[in-house]
Image (cartoon, grey):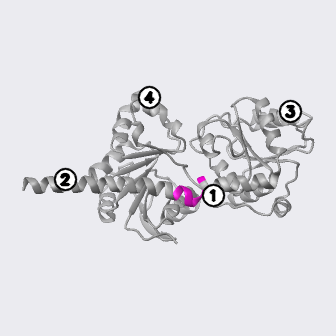
Amino acid sequence: MAPPTSLHVAQISFHVDPVRGPSQILQDWWPLVDCAEMVAQTGARVSVVQACVRSDRLTRNGVNYHFVRPEPGEPAIASGREFAALMRGLDADVFHVHGLSFPKEVLGLAKLAPNTPIFLQDHASGLPRFWRRRPYRRGLAVAGAVSFCALEQAKPFIKAGMLSESVVHGIPECSSRFTPGDQPAARRLVEVHGDPAVLWVGHFDTNKDPLTVLAGVAAAVSRLPELQLWCCFGTAPLEEEVRRVIDGNRLLRGRVHLLGKVPHEKIEQLMRAADVFALGSHREGSGCAVIEALACGLPPVVTDIPSFRALTGAGRTGALWPCDDARAFTDALLRTATQARNALRIQVRAHFDAEVSFHAVGHKLRAVYENLSHHRAVGQGAAARRDGERG
């Protein structure tokens, strides 16, 4: 059981979904819910403030969700009276703002509660264009801490003079509720086969790079003749080209299964059924699908990019390969697929438990909150002493 505490965190999302109402947001935006609940499980009190097309208040699993509608004519909630009254009423110890793309709102928040420390969490925001950096720099300047999935992702911001290295933390963007399961049962349920069965979960676009993975799979067939590739994807600008490549290669025809978009709960069963998870991303803010694979004990064979290095312990769990390098992917796939699979799955899940689980990420976030809250208390104490001396 988590220890009781007086720590109160307000997690704030300024993004307004133009369609979803409160209940639908909680159903569809599971990372928002997970982030709140993983911190609540440490014993902290968590309030979530979410911009929305309709104002409402809901309570789920000990977390209070406050949905705030922008005032007429206003694109954001930060300048509204409802938001100001809510933030004063919450009297949180720390503000946790999702995303780096809301500098105006963050500045308004700092003005509204100047003594409350602000923590910003990157969600693949990326370094803004040069002519947009001034407001971003001002917004980042009021933050006492900023987290990225990988510390390396902060380097462009630091180099551009927008962030101080001292405020940067490396914390996974999310976790997963997925768990390992009975692989034969999962295979029967989702009708997956292969030795190995390789799973892809990602868009068919140039960033995810399915064409390089297909080339690597074709090259691996001589060593892994029973290999089967199963692909889940949503947005698919490259789908036509992917199908052409498959149809034109006798090593891929009948071996690559395009499942399209599948329900989120089915992804868990597919990950339990598969032997290897593969992805060819060139850039990722974090990598939710990789985190889900780790949660299921599914070894990732993914590109050597900052977020994937952070999530896999620099490749100690699974294998990393350079972007655009089909031969390197083949080699990494062969190394992973020929290991003792049960032992490897246990190792992958142990890494998840230690580094990316609800418990692990929740306590990493809480440690930052407590540090900010401590410095706030020290600063207030020093100010009170100065006022006493002047009096």
According to the image, label 2 marks what residue? 383
Give the quarter of the image for residue 357.
Answer: bottom right
Name the secondary structure under disc 3: helix
Q: Tell me the residue at 83%/37% (across/down).
A: 217
Q: CA distance from mark 4 to mark 3?
A: 40 Å
Q: CA distance from mark 4 to mark 1?
A: 34 Å
**Label placed on residue 159:** 4
Image location (x, y in percent) of residue 316: 68, 43
Q: Between tags 1 and 3, which lies in front?
A: 1
Please name the predominant secondary structure of the magenta segment in the image: helix
Give the magenta part as a residue range. 355-362
Badge 2: how crowded within 10 Å, few (<14), some, or many (20+)?
few
* Marked residue nearer the N-terminal end (1 or 3): 3
Q: CA distance from mark 2 to mark 1?
A: 42 Å
Examine the rendered structure and indicate whether residue 318 appears above or below residue 185. Answer: above
Left or right placement of residue 157 versus residue 326 in this view: left
Circles 2, 4 touching at the beta carbon (< 8 Å): no
Q: Residue furthest left?
A: 391
According to the image, label 1 marks what residue? 353
Q: CA distance from mark 2 to mark 3?
A: 67 Å
